[in-house]
Image (cartoon, rainbow, N blue to C red):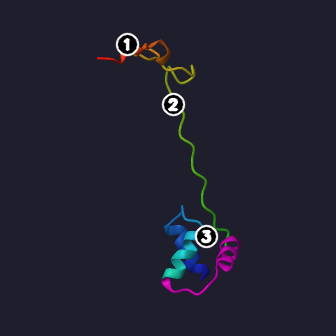
Amino acid sequence: MRARLGKVSRDRPRWGYRRAHALLLEEGWCLNRKRTQRLWREEGLRVPQRRRKRQRLGELAGSGQLESTCPSWNSLSRGDYQP
């Protein structure tokens, strides 16, 4: 069972013990959720942290403001939307 949990973790790295437990039940294993959780923890299996998005590079990256060619929402009047 430990080997199967390890294989599930390698094949599906974003799955945690709950989804792995559901898969094992579908495959016919007879075990409860607590045992799956205990084995998962004892094997040191973890869902990897999501990586942060890379920061933008370039002229506008440090300024915190983007240049816009369209007027700001505050400067639009009601007449700008009517045909």
Q: Where is residue 69, by image quadrant?
A: top left
Give the extent of the magenta segment: 27-42
Magenta residue check for 7: no
Q: Which residue is drawn at the image coordinates 61% and 80% (left, top)?
A: 2
- Is the Cβ of the residue at disc 2 closer than 8 Å to that at disc 3? no
- The reply, left or right, for residue 39 in relation to residue 66 is right
- Is the Cβ of the residue at disc 2 closer than 8 Å to that at disc 1? no
Element marked by disc 2: loop
Q: Which residue is drawn at the image coordinates 59% and 70% (left, top)?
A: 18
Q: Which residue is mark 2?
A: 56
Magenta segment, prevailing SS (helix, strand or loop): helix
**Viewer-proximal residue among 20 and 61:** 20
- Look at the image and tell me in which quarter the N terminus lies: bottom right
Element marked by disc 3: helix
Q: Which residue is mark 1?
A: 79
Q: Distance of mark 2 from mark 1, alpha carbons? A: 37 Å
Residue type, mark 2 in image: Arg
Q: Which residue is drawn at the image coordinates 57% and 47% (left, top)?
A: 51
Q: Distance of mark 1 from mark 3, alpha carbons? A: 57 Å
Query: Few, some or many C-alpha atoms within 10 Å of disc 3 (few <14, some 14-19, many ≥20)?
Result: many
Mark in front: 2 vs 3: 3
How many labels sit on residues? 3
